[in-house]
Each structure stands twice: as C-alpha cells, then as structure tokens.
Amino acid sequence: MRPVDSLTPAWIVVDWGTTSFRAALVTLAGTVLAQIETPEGIQVIPDRAYEPVLMRALEGWFAAHGPLPVVALGMITSRTGWVEVPYVCCPARAADLAAGTFRQTLPNGAKLIFLAGLTDPARKPFADVMRGEETQILGFGVARDATLVLPGTHSKWARLRSGAIESFQTFVTGEIFALLSQHSFIAKAGAGQNDPPDWAAFDSGVAEAASEGAYADAFLSLLFSVRTGMLAGALGASQILDYVSGLVIGHEFREARGQGWFKTGDAIGIVGNDQLNLRYGKVAQAFGLKVLDGGEGAAIAGAMVLCRLFDKESPDAD
Amino acid sequence: MRPVDSLTPAWIVVDWGTTSFRAALVTLAGTVLAQIETPEGIQVIPDRAYEPVLMRALEGWFAAHGPLPVVALGMITSRTGWVEVPYVCCPARAADLAAGTFRQTLPNGAKLIFLAGLTDPARKPFADVMRGEETQILGFGVARDATLVLPGTHSKWARLRSGAIESFQTFVTGEIFALLSQHSFIAKAGAGQNDPPDWAAFDSGVAEAASEGAYADAFLSLLFSVRTGMLAGALGASQILDYVSGLVIGHEFREARGQGWFKTGDAIGIVGNDQLNLRYGKVAQAFGLKVLDGGEGAAIAGAMVLCRLFDKESPDAD
C-alpha cells in the first residue's frame, strides 16, 4: 500500500486515441497533478512500436515518482492498437469493466492495465461498440439513472439504469461534419471555421434540424440547404460551417429522439470536451432538454474509479 | 431553314459540368453523330476563359460543318460558370424552359444558347435548384405523369404532371458516398471499389436501409454499421464500399418515400448514367417499385426538344 495524501501521484492515466496521446499523473482521489498531450495518436506510430513511445512519453514521471502503475484506454486497446481487449457486454457496472482488463508489465516493472471497451449486443444491424467512452461514463457517475450523450467523431448516446450502463448507440456526427467541412462541394464555399463560432448561423442550422416540418427528417436532402441557403442569400460564406455544424448536431438529436433516447422535457448529461459540450448544450436546449451537471474531465475521473478497484484487489490478482 | 436528313448535323449540344466537358454533334431528330468528352470541367478553367476552351474543343466540327448553333447546359450556366442564367420556376413545361435561355454569338458567328436551370420554390427550408437535370427530364419525356429519380452527386427526385415538371427535391447521396469512400475513418478499412460491384454486399447495405426496423431511420447511426459489421465479421474489407453504396442509395429511397415521392408498388423512371442506373434499379426493386423505360441518353434528347423549339422561332427572336 502506497502512502496516500492529496499530493501523492498514484496512477498514470493514458488516453491514447487514433489522433492523439494524452497522459495524466493523478492522485488516488483523482486530482490531476500534471498532463501531457502529443499528436502521437496510434495512427502515426509505425510497426506497432507503442511501448517505446509510451516509455519515452512517461520517462520524466517514472524518474521522479518511480514505476507508477499505468492504466490505458481508448483505441490503443482496439484491434488496430497495442492489444485488443475484448469488449465487456451491456448492461455493465464498474466492477464488470474492471474485470475485463488486459495486463502486462513495462520494462521498468510498472504495471500496465489496458481497459476494456463496451459492446451493446442489442443494437441493429450489428452489436454497437465503444472504446474509452465507457470510462468517461464512469467518471460522470452511474449512481443515478440518466441518459447521456458523449459528443465526438462518433458520438454515443447511453442509458444509465440501476448502477449500470444499460445500452448505447453510436452516431457518426463528428465524422460527417469533418467530411463536409473539409472535402465537400456543398460546403466548399465556406470561409473556414469561426472562432468564436457564429452562433446565429449555428442556431439556424439547429432550428432546421429541429423543425416540426417533415422535410427535416430527410438528412440527405436537408444537407443541400447549405447550397440553396447560399443561393437564396440566407447564408453568407462565413456562416456555412457553423450552419452545417448546427444542422448535423441537430440532426443527431432529431435521430436520437426518434430512436427513443429522449423526449421533450427530459434531462440529459453531456459528457465530453468543452468545445463540443457547448454546442451540444445549445442543441439540447433547442430540443427542449435540461442538461445535468458533471460532464467535464470524465475520462480521468472514470479511470480512477477503476484504479481504486484495482488497488483493492489482492496482490496476486495480476 | 437548313436541309434536314438523317445524317445532317443540326446542333452541337454541350453538357458542361463541374468536372467534365461533353459535346455531341446531333441531327435535328436527335441522332448523335459524334461525341467529345474531356476532363475540362468548369472547376479547372482559369480566369473564366470558357470561350477559348469551347472554340478549341469544337473547332473540328465547325471546320467540317460550318458555324452550327450550340446549346449549353449544366453548371456552365450557374453563378460559378460562364453566365448565370436565372432559374425557371416549377411547374415548368418545355416551352417555359425554352423561354428562359440566355443567348450570345461565338467568334465564328455561331449562335450559343445557354439553357436555364429550374427552381422549386415550394421546398423547405429554401427553394431547391437543378441545372441540367431539367433537360434530362425533357429527354425522358414529360407527356406522361410520373415520378423520376435522377441519380448523381446531388440526386433529384421529380414529379411530372400535366406535361410539366411540377416539383423536385435534391438528395446529396453521391456526394456523401464519395466523402465516405474517399476520406472517412469508417470506410478507410475498405479495399477500394470492386469492378464489377460486389452485388451481395451492395444488396445487404440496401436491405439495412430498407429495413422495417426503426433503427434504419437514423442515418448518422446506420452509417456506423460499416464499422460494427466488420467487427462482427459480417463484412470483409473488399465488401465495405459496395455495402456503403447500398446503404447510402437505399437511405435516399427511404427518405424519398418518407417525403412522399413514392409508395410501394409505384412505377418510377430512373434517368441518368448507366452505372448508377443499374444500382438505382436494384434499390428501386428492393423498395417494391417498378422501373419505367426511357432513362438513357436523356440529356441530349432533352436538349434537342428545346432546339426544335428554337428552330421554330421567328428569325429575329434572338
């Protein structure tokens, strides 16, 4: 048992995705003492040489604090990553996720625990999957029954019930927005992204996606409003990308409502990064939803829920 | 009046789009005597230097047959083309489209007639537009009441009633397929397009889009089945792109049915290029539709419907 106080590093949490590498030095209570972020996502690592990249990234922390245990989540645990950890099945509690890990030892003797992803076998046409978001959900907390949305390249809607992640569904919203904004004819007239966003343009995209008119059901048709809106003089070049963003995120909510994830007046949690949370919060409001608190910094908090379970295991468990 | 026989060139029809230049030497009856196709689409012509490109492309025909009149359609008549010809409004008959042209004279004295596009002001959220497809519709023939689909980057569904193009709606199906197949994460595992297509994979994508299950309503979610199908072992890398093609075209039909363009058992016309017509024909069948004959070579046939009207005008009309 290591000594535990408010400033003692206890674990290193590595969130290693397709396009980025993020690590945090964390106390057992979940306080983040230091963070690293690099663009060394798994897609840029040649020959699956993940271990040297990890050791180099963490060498300063290992030198200062000894061989702290490392917990890894995200696409690094997928078929295209370091080791493929089998998916845990819904409904899943924290203990089910903790039991589904894959473990090995780093060259310096530090323990490395790969977290499992989650699968929902009830989805059609094929079982749905997530890798990393299940940990964010634990960080949000599974004690209360709730519906959550986790914005991202592949957004997830999830239902918490009786202390478990009961079910979830993926929407490829962020990917479609990226494709439209970077490569499409219909958005090529756009003048790049605004910072801060043009909220009026965003809101008008959301309003179309939330329209009571049946025309808004047809996503492939609604997207053409980017061009017809410009031709009609209703959208300027500088507004295109924020309009598309509102249209696409708005349509995710329209579809999620159609799939039974919420109805007007419900409360939902929005779990993810600040920038997207703001956009999702505005869309939630347009769809008549209340937003629950607690969606920030969820990945590290969720990893620490599991690390505290690991620390309680008998020493010969791994 | 020029002499007219079965081998006399009467008009040159130029279908000039964003990515290609096509010209046909045509008799008054619509027989195509010769054709030219180059990749000189309007997007690659610098400084709007359209006239020299046109004159160079047609110089052989002008030398052999004199300054034949030229009719031009497609994106060349748009805001980003040579001249922006205002849209004619739905409902529109051939005579309305013939009256909406813009005319000028080429350096050799040949008449150049830019055809109008068509707008449907009843569409939401903005008036819909087409440029070129209205001419294909004339080529299909507007005498019988019918519903047509014109497959393409931006597919059009159109209704013919009482000799007019009554209404239409755009779906950006081809563009979304191109984005997904060329740039997306979810399809990047795909092994390129099959020639001939893997029809079994295509059909399974169509079957999902045509499913009676409500899950198939959610396009942004259904797209993720490309990845989950691979993870489930149901889709191999070589099947991905044909599956996506079936899924996306199938969803266009699902949305079009939802928008009231057809119901099971109806007959529709498929007007466009052979390769896409085959795919659309298979999807039409999966949605319980009969396919009307007459969708091939429609652009030139439609242009000649208008050219015969131009030839009947009094000599001082232009």
Image (cartoon, coloured by chain):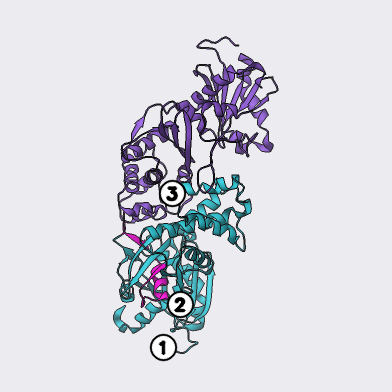
Chain colours: A purple, B cyan
Work out how far the residue at label 3 is from the one at label 2, CA to CA, in angstroms.
46 Å
**Which comes sooner in the sequence, label 3 or label 1?**
1
Hey, what amino acid is under mark 2?
A: Ile
At a point 62% along the width and 59% down the height, the residue shown is B194
Relative to A28, residue B126 above or below: below
For mark 1, name the chain.
Answer: B
User: Mark 3 — residue?
Assistant: B218
Magenta-highlighted residues: B123-148
Relative to B16, residue A220 above or below: above
User: Mark 1 — residue?
Assistant: B2
In the image, B140 versus B199, the foreground residue is B199
The answer to whether residue A109 is visible is yes
User: Mark 2 — residue?
Assistant: B12
Q: Are marks 3 and 2 on the same chain?
A: yes
Hey, what amino acid is under mark 1?
A: Arg
Q: Contact, CB < 8 Å: mark 2 with mark 1? A: no
Query: For the residues carrying marks 3 and 1, which lies nearer the camera in this image?
Result: 3
In the image, A279 versus B59, the foreground residue is A279
